[in-house]
């Protein structure tokens, strides 16, 4: 356990230095535990329990997996769909897992508890902070896809103010000097915006960037405080519907198949609890496949149930919105777009968000998703 104590020391002493260099980021303390009423458990009303012993004469039956507890940090966004569906449909219980969710709003807030193994699993964007932490010896593994922008499933994009659209703003060349809001500096949104601007011979530095929470973007756009918002669903669809903005481009149009979120395992969870980590992945990918059945294959029986689950737990409460907005892409085999992550890392290095080049491949551990695919079989 000596390495674990060293790891905790590294996290507590060095995470402040992981923030991107160009812009000062606010100091964020480790998140407090959410109230029990705000943290759904996979067990629901009936906690997971060890299966009964096999009756006499059935001694050759495989022993059930040992019960295990898993702590998960997530933000209850649309790209958390696989984690939430697995809970509501009982897939964690099927794997004899007691899963406890803790709400953690951002990638920056998720990094300290993952690095200190206060949570076992987390899902959010890969940021320069994670790469800088890895370079300092904090091991957090990227184990699966948790949200990407692909054809028909591009849930992030650019919305321009309606009056600017009416005056002829149509592309990157028209945005020079305009105020553009993004959720955070040094996030995956910034290199994606830079790719959009390059299409007009410009760079992200030609914009007046401001940091704004997704929920604050609609009001700022309608009030004229910003010109463009790099936002996410359901806000994109809502801004277009209320007339305050026009969708200028979906992210897949300018950053195809951009890997916007990943699933993380804390190092002790991945290294010391391999069986539990594998079972968690089986439950997760089982749910992700049901998500794809509902929204890609349009399964008429499954889709209403999945919409009901997401309406219950995520910020998108209106079931009708699921017919109008684009959802997050979730790979049914958990595959991560490594090239996309590499491209983002190169942007961060070029713009001094990273202190040194960290090979993205070192963070990625495909073994858990591969195991789950073996158990579930090929996705049809």
Image (cartoon, helix red, strand yellow):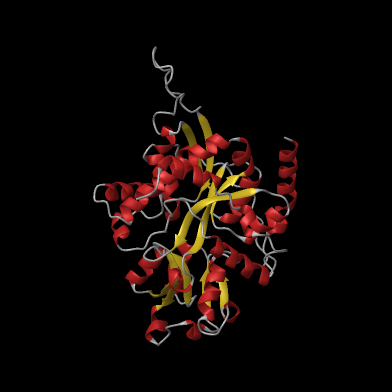
Outermost residue to the bottom: 167
Residue at 70 percent of width and 66 percent of height: 21
Residue at 54 percent of width and 80 percent of height: 198
Given residues 206 and 32, the one toward you in this image is: 206
The quarter of the image holding the N terminus is top right
Image-quadrant location for residue 338: bottom right
- Visible residue check, residue 43: no
Image spot of residue 182 (x, y percent): 53, 68
- Visible residue check, residue 201: yes
Q: Viewed as shown, does residue 31 lie left or right of 380?
A: right
Q: Is residue 180 positioned above or below 125 on the image? A: below
Image spot of residue 64 (x, y percent): 46, 26
Query: What is the number of callouts on the image?
Result: 0
Image spot of residue 262 (x, y percent): 52, 54
Given residues 321 and 80, the one toward you in this image is: 80
Q: Is residue 291 positioned above or below 44 on the image? A: below
Q: Viewed as shown, does residue 227 lie left or right of 138?
A: left
Residue at 50 percent of width and 28 percent of height: 67
Outermost residue to the top: 56
Image spot of residue 301 (x, y percent): 24, 47
């Amino acid at each position: 356990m000596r390495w674990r104590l060293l790891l905790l020391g590294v996290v507590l002493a060095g995470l402040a230095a992981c923030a991107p260099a160009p812009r000062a980021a606010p100091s964020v303390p480790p998140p407090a535990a959410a109230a029990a009423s705000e943290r759904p458990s996979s067990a629901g009303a009936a906690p997971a329990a060890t299966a009964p012993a096999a009756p006499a004469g059935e001694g050759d039956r495989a022993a059930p997996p040992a019960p295990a507890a898993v702590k998960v940090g997530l933000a209850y966004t649309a790209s958390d769909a696989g984690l939430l569906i697995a809970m509501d449909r009982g897939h964690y219980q099927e794997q004899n897992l007691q899963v406890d969710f803790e709400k953690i709003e951002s990638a920056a807030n998720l990094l300290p508890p993952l690095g200190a193994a206060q949570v076992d699993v987390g899902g959010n964007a890969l940021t320069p902070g994670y790469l800088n932490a890895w370079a300092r010896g904090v091991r957090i593994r990227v184990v699966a896809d948790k949200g990407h922008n692909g054809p028909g499933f591009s849930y992030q994009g650019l919305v321009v103010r309606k009056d600017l659209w009416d005056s002829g703003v149509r592309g990157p060349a028209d945005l020079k000097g305009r105020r553009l809001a993004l959720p955070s500096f040094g996030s995956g949104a910034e290199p994606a915006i830079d790719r959009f601007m390059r299409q007009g011979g410009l760079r992200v530095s030609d914009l007046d960037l401001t940091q704004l929470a997704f929920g604050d973007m609609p009001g700022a756009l309608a009030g004229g405080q910003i010109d463009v918002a790099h936002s996410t669903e359901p806000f994109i669809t809502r801004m277009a519907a209320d007339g305050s903005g026009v969708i200028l481009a979906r992210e897949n149009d300018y950053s195809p198949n951009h890997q916007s979120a990943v699933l993380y395992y804390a190092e002790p969870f991945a290294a010391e609890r391999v069986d539990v980590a594998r079972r968690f992945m089986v439950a997760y990918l089982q749910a992700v496949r049901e998500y794809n059945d509902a929204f890609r294959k349009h399964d008429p029986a499954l889709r209403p149930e999945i919409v009901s689950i997401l309406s219950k737990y995520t910020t998108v409460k209106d079931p009708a919105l699921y017919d109008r907005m684009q959802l997050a892409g979730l790979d049914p085999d958990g595959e991560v777009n490594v090239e996309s992550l590499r491209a983002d890392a190169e942007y961060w290095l070029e713009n001094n968000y990273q202190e040194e080049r960290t090979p993205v491949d070192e963070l990625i551990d495909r073994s858990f998703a591969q195991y789950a695919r073996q158990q579930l079989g090929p996705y049809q």
